[in-house]
Amino acid sequence: MQTGEVIRNYRKQKNMTQEEMARRLGVTAPAVNKWENGVSLS
């Protein structure tokens, strides 16, 4: 399983949107989207 898949699965298990997850982590929603799609993991 890729890192992005793990992030997406965790987020969905917690019933969070990308925006909610981003807010909790102190990042932007596009950053979460990039992580989930494997575009950027930094």
Image (cartoon, rainbow, N blue to C red):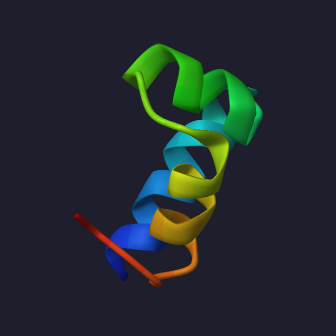
Numbered-mark total: 0
Residue 8 position, x and y percent, is 58, 56
- Horizontally, residue 13 falls left or right of residue 31, namely right
- Horizontally, residue 15 falls left or right of residue 29, namely right
Residue 23 position, x and y percent, is 56, 19
Q: Quadrant of the N terminus?
A: bottom left
- The residue sitting at 22% across, 64% down in the picture is 42
Point out the residue furthest to the left here.
42
- The residue sitting at 69% across, 40% down in the picture is 18
- Horizontally, residue 38 falls left or right of residue 37, namely left
Q: Image height check: is 34 above or below 6?
A: below
**Camera-side residue of 8 and 19:** 19
**Quarter holding residue 26:** top left
Q: Image height check: is 9 above or below 17?
A: below
Residue 27 position, x and y percent, is 45, 33
- The residue sitting at 42% across, 61% down in the picture is 6
